[in-house]
Image: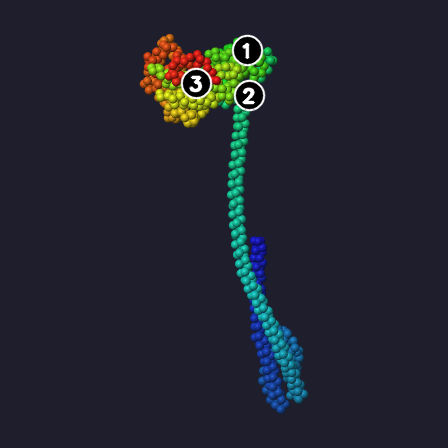
Amino acid sequence: MPKNSSKTSIFLASCMLSIILLSLISSVILYRQIANLQLGPVRTELVNFINEYEYELMRSTMAFTEEYNHHNDSSEHGEFTKWFNMLLSRYQGLERVQKQHSQIFNRLNLNLLKANLQRIQLLVTRKDIREEANLLRVEQLFNELVIETHQFQTQWAFQNEDLVLAKQKKTLSSYQNSVLLILVTFVIGILMVIYLFSNNKKLLTLQRTLEQRVYMRTKELKDSNSHLISEVQERKKTELQLMQSQLAAEQAHKKIQYQANFDPLTKLANRNLFLERFKQASIRADRNNTFVALLFLDLDRFKFINDTLGHSIGDKLLQEASSRIQEVLRATDTAARFGGDEFAMVLSDIEQLQTVDLIVSRILKSLACPFRLSGNDAFVSASIGITVYPTDGKDSETLLRKADSAMYKAKDAGRNNYQFFTAQMDIEANERRLLEAALYKAVEAQEFCLHYQPIIKSKSRGIAGVEALIRWKDEARGYIPPTEFIPLAEEIGLILPIGEWVLREACGTAVKWVENLSEPFVVSVNVSSRQFQKCNMAEQIAGILEETGLDGKHLMLEITEGLLMGDDQQILSQLQEIRDMGISLAIDDFGTGYSSLSYLKKYPITTLKIDRSFIQDIDIDSDDDELIKGILSMAKSLNVSVVAEGVETIRQAEFLIENDCLLIQGFHYSKPMPAIEFSEYLQQGGSQINLELAADRDCA
Ligand code: C2E
Ligand code: CA
Ligand code: CA
């Protein structure tokens, strides 16, 4: 579009130029035509010249007639001479004029004029001029001149008129042409102005559209530019993200690879790498005819520390223990963590089993040193089970299983101990596995029941309450004590359904007894720390109370010191909530754990249950006597009630009564009994029943 308009402009400009040029040419032509008009005066001069010649000719003729007439004898010829001389000079003038204006004078016979004038001059000078013949001759010559002149005059006059007319015509047409030219030029000019004007309008709109287009295009370009910029930025961002994600992927890959082979917490090998190292070691052992020792290590009391001091302290302990193990091992050995506080080690290239004894002793010694954790010294020992390749097994699975059994044996043997695998261990481990399976089945089939052991008011011998104790009779094994299956249930998580069942069952049973009693009565239920850690106990208990209709004031929960040691805010709030329901809170087996009195103030504890071990030593160990006295006086000052557990003899009972222990529980009063028996017991007001019978009764 701009190209077209520029072409038009060039065309218009050249048109204007040509118009100016045409006007210039027309003006020049006109000017010249006007200049031609000045020829007039020249012609007038010529006419005058010819007229003067004619006049002089006429005067000369007249003067000759007068002066040379034969009747006139006068010799005076002055007038004639004067005019004749004038005529002669006029002739010379004519000759000049004819040269200048040959066109006009070409018809005048100058030769005749010259010849006649010369003849007249000759004749006039003759003496016989007065003779008639001569006179006539002169007159004839003059006449010829007059006629010639006259003829020329008439011809010239005509010719002159024609010429003037032609010239005028020419000038007129020239004028007309010029005017026409100017007119045409003017019209063209006007047309061009009109064209330019209209075109200008078009051009203006064109310009506007063009400007608009340019604006739009610029805007589009700007937009696309900014779009491009943002796209480039976006691309850069994406590239960066890609790089980052690549980096992250690489790191993740490394991490995965690391995680595939190492334990992230302790940086020890994991099970994978452990098995790989064992494989390599066993190949070497086969080749070199040596042994490989496989160690299974479990930290003693780790669970307790983890539960009481918290998981982060537990993790620190694991890390510290790991580095101690690493330090003791040889470069060719591998230590691995299988999870929790379970460690395994491959001791390769063993030629004599004494080497294993040496390394294992060093490990135990190293771990027995106190661990400094958060300002407290923690004492952790380890139990190690050992199997030997190829003596105890060929594959890692068998060897690990056997080492695990040996480890349990070491634990049973009093901890901080190691045991080489024996065939007997295998049998025991197998039994444990069978028990585990049986426990799962028992939970599903609800093979449990509760026995109830009364808590006696020492002074009045009235019944203050009852402790619910779980019983499980397996079809194959018969009666299995809770001390055997409760820790296993805690370990494998089955304590949660079992614990909930105990609570529901105890509350449901107790509510019937409470209805028939006028005295305050409390049913005491053992609750594992695990239950508090994994469940919202306050919520669960509230539900059970509502379900069974038992008032909270008739329920007591027996918890262990370990639960309070963790300083867990969540546990505190759960206990507070439970306490707010009117439920009593007792610390079971008091004296066996930390026995820190600070938590008695911190937690809403209502009761302490002095552990059986102290009661059994009454009158035997005076230290224990003092301890019991101390607990009793402290409890009194803290306004906490005390229950003495495991009271078997009258002496023990007397000692407790003497020292103001108000509540007693033990075989001396009653063994735990089924609910029906306990109902009877209650009806009889707590009179002695057949203890043997009650103790042996099973869940059926
Ligand atoms: P515990 O809470 O200390 O319960 C007292 C244990 O001492 C009971 O053993 C009881 O039968 C026994 N006992 C009572 N008086 C005497 C006595 O005079 N002499 C002797 N030698 N023993 C006496 P049991 O029923 O075998 O329970 C053992 C442990 O199992 C309980 O100790 C408790 O820690 C746990 N347990 C029992 N039932 C449950 C339960 O329902 N839940 C939880 N978490 N643990 C339970
Ligand atoms: Ca208890
Ligand atoms: Ca107890």
| Percent x, y of residue 168 | 60, 74
Mark 3 vs ligand 1: CB below 8 Å: no
Q: Is 27 rendered above or below residue 336?
A: below
Residue bearing mark 1: 423
| Percent x, y of residue 602 | 36, 22
The answer to whether 398 appears left or right of 522 in the picture is right
Q: Which label was assigned to residue 272?
A: 2
Q: Earlier in the sequence, mark 2 or mark 3?
A: 2
Residue bearing mark 3: 676
The answer to whether 552 appears left or right of 323 in the picture is left
Crowd tier of the residue under label 1, counting other residues whose Cα lies within 10 Å: few below 14, some 14–19, many 20 or above = few
Assign a secondary structure to mark 3.
Answer: helix
Mark nearest the camera among 2 and 1 is 1
Q: Amino acid at mark 2?
A: Asn
Quadrant position of residue 450: top left
Does residue 116 appear in this view? yes
